[in-house]
Each structure stands twice: as structure tokens, then as C-alpha cells.
Amino acid sequence: MKTLGLICLILIIALGTVGVGYAAFNQPLNNTNNLNTGYYAVSWGTVTGSTTSGTGAVTIGTVTSSNFQLTIGGALPGFTGTVSYTINNTGPIPAKVSSISLTAGTGVTIINGSGTSASPWLITLSGGTSGTTDVQVYSTVTTGTTLAASTSPAASGILVISVPSGLAIDQGATGTLTFTINTQQNP
Amino acid sequence: MRKLGIICVVLLLALGCLGASYASWTQSLTATNASVTLGSWIAEVQGPCTGFTPSAGSNTVSASWTKATKTGDLLIAIFSYDNSGDTIIPPSGGWTIAVSSVNSGHATTTIYYILNAGTQSGSYTWTSNNIRHMTIVLLEYSGVATSSALDKTANANGNSATVSTGNTASTGQAYELAIGALAVSGNTTFTSLSSGWAEVGSVSNITGYITSVPIYKILSATGTQNATASITSQPWTGAIATFK
């Protein structure tokens, strides 16, 4: 075993010497290309709010890459407001919308619905009559929407918020919601 | 076996790192704590609270609220009598004339209002300087602006089988309350009221010298406003007022 170890050591030294010699006989080549690692950069683009019918105010507050502030005030029966938004994908990785959700915050109960125009989320607000729909919400962007890499905007959509006419009176009812669009790499 | 174990651990760590990298390629875009608040909208709270003079007539007519009115509401009184030109004194409390309509010698109807009213209860009396046949109707509405709410008014009168409030100019905003008053110097049934209008109730004095019909409509779009109804042909008068 001792002899074998000695042989291995000699071979390593010999191969190292050959390597050094080979390197010495070669011209160094400089590669000037950049090699970037992948990064994921999906974000909100522009976000604007407006009242399309009825009485009520849609206000968009601070918009960051991942969040925006939305306030709807003084909405009366027959009100429809919209939040028009774009989604940017400034990174090299193609993405898609993996899911869309609406979660109840303070004073809100989400009755049912899937968030599409055919099946809007139906919501009651604090102070309202239990089980009576006060607000309907849906998104025109749906799960599966693709967000091509390095594209701004990669998608655009509208969040529609409406107060149906002829409701039981829930005057002054209020509550908070969180609207979320989850994205992931595509595929 | 020990070396194999070490290799497996290294492979697992490598795969874990790859998984972590993949998992990080997601992003949630949110509107957190989006606030939604409904406004106060127009609704009838109570009415009609009615009163009328006896068959012999009187120089006063009174009506009582069914329940105490709420602070901030719009109070309406529709006063009618079977003549014209009298001096009418409303009760205290800030009653203001929105619009009056006169069919000379036959009938007069007037829409009074109080914006942003304090609470009221009990009986309220209108007084004329003559003995007349009179009716009074009290109404309460919530959700109307508490200042500068009176928007448009109109009146009309005639002697025919169709009674009208007259045509207002185009209303200043979509969401308003329109109050109408129709009256005839007789006792008749009002039919075929214009679409969208609601008859609050009809009130007539006992002998039928004056019949008054208060009506209202919650508007959802700007435009001129008018209501008509069918009656047996006779002298009539009508008035309309819209409130923001």
C-alpha cells in the first residue's frame, strides 16, 4: 500500500507538471461576453381607477412593484368602478398567472363566486344585512394568462367592482379586501 | 456504505438548492386592504302621515309623524287646498317652499321641505287665513344631501283628464329624489301613473272637495322629470321638486 501511494503521488506531480507546461505554451483567450444568471421580475405596471357608472369614487393610492392601494368610497346602488392595470415582466424568465384570489379583510364576508364575469365574487360588508350581496368583484385576467419574458406590459386587465341596484339597504357599510394575482415561471 | 451515504446527502442538498431556486421564481401582485365603503342612499323612511279638514272645512289642518324622524333626514310636507290665493302659515321648524302650483279658484298644492332636519315627532299644523278644505301629507327620506339639495322644480295646472307635475329642466346629477304632488278640487281616482313613480298614498278630505296624491321617484340618470296620471276630467294642479 505504501508503494502504491508513492506511485500515485508521483503520477499527480507528473500530470501537474505537464499541465503547467501545456498552459505555458498557450495564448490566453479573453471571453468578453456576459453570462447572466436568471432572475424573475414580474410587477404591476400602470394602475388607474375610474367610475364607469353610478355614484362612487375609485381612488388608487401608492403603486409599488408588487402592491397598490385601492379605495372605493361612497358607492351607491348602480355603481360600477374599474381598476385598469398592466403587468410587466421585465426579466428573462417567461411567466404566467398561476392563480387569482380575493381574501376577506376587516368587515367582509365573501359569500361565493370564482372571480370571473360570469361568476363574480359576491361580498357582504360589515353593517350590511347578513347574506345580502353588497358588492360584486371580478377580474378580466384569468389563471393561465401568459406573461412573456422581457415584455412591458406583458398583460393587461381590469378589476371590476359593482354595487347592484335594488339591494336591501346597507348604507354606510364598509370593509377591506385583498386582491391577489399570483404568478410563476412558465412553464 | 458510508461513502454512498455521503454521496446521497450531497445529491439531496444539490436538488434542494435547485428546488429553492425554482420556488423563488414566483411573485404575488396584490392590492392589500382595499377599502370599500358604501354611501348613504335615498330611501323612504316613513309616510304618508296624513291629515285633512272636516267636511265643514277649517282654517287649520294637521298631521302627525308615525314615529320620530331621524336627525339629518329630508322632511317633506305636501299641502293642498281647494282654492287659491290664501296666506298659508306652515308650522315652526324651518319648513321652506320648494314649489307651489295654483289653479286659480280651484286648487293649490305646495311642496314644503326641511333639509338636514332635526328630529321631529307629534303633530304639525298648517294654517290658512280662510276656512278651506285642506289636506296635508308628511314624508321622510334619508340619503339626501344635507345642504343645497333642492335641484329642479316645475309646476302645471289645467282642466282635463290628465294631471301633470310639469316638466323640470334637466337634473344636475344622476342620483336624485323627485317628489311630485298632484291635486284636484274634487274626489277622484288617479290611474296610469307614469312609469317609475310610486304613489305614496292618496288623501282626500271627507267631502271630497280636495284630493291630493303625493308621488316620488328615485332617479338614476340626469334628464328632465315629469309625472302624469289619468283622472276624470276636472280642474287639477301639479308640482315637482328634485333633491340631490
Image (cartoon, coloured by chain):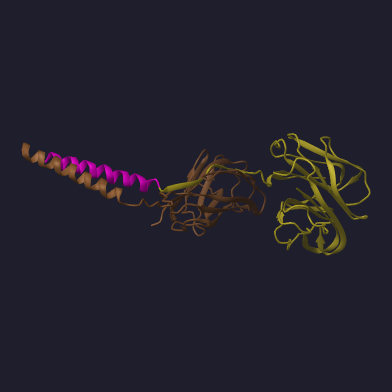
Chain colours: A brown, B yellow
Image: magenta residue range: B1-24
Does residue B209 appear left or right of residue A104 in this picture? right
Give how far across and how far down residue B215 sits, in percent.
74, 53
- How many numbered circles are shown? 0
Which image quadrant for residue A8? top left
Q: Quadrant of the C terminus of chain A?
A: bottom left
| Residue A130 visible here | no
Residue A163 lies left or right of residue B48; in this view the side is: left
Judge from the rendering whether residue B53 lies leftward or rightward of residue A7; answer left or right: right
**Percent from the top left, x then y, of residue A175?**
55, 40
Question: Quadrant where the N terminus of chain A lies?
Answer: top left
| Residue B43 in the figure: left or right of residue B136 | left
Residue drawn where x is 19% and y is 46% of the image: A15
In this view, B117 is above or below A22: above
Helix, strand or loop for the magenta stretch, by majority: helix
Residue B159 in percent (x, y) is at 87, 63
The residue lying at 76 percent from left, 59 percent from top is B190
Nearest the viewer among A29 and B125 is A29
Residue in the picture at 78% in, 52% down: B172
Q: Is residue A32 visible?
A: yes
Q: Is residue B23 magenta?
A: yes
Q: Residue B80 at x, y = what percent?
A: 84, 49
**Residue B13 belongs to magenta span:** yes
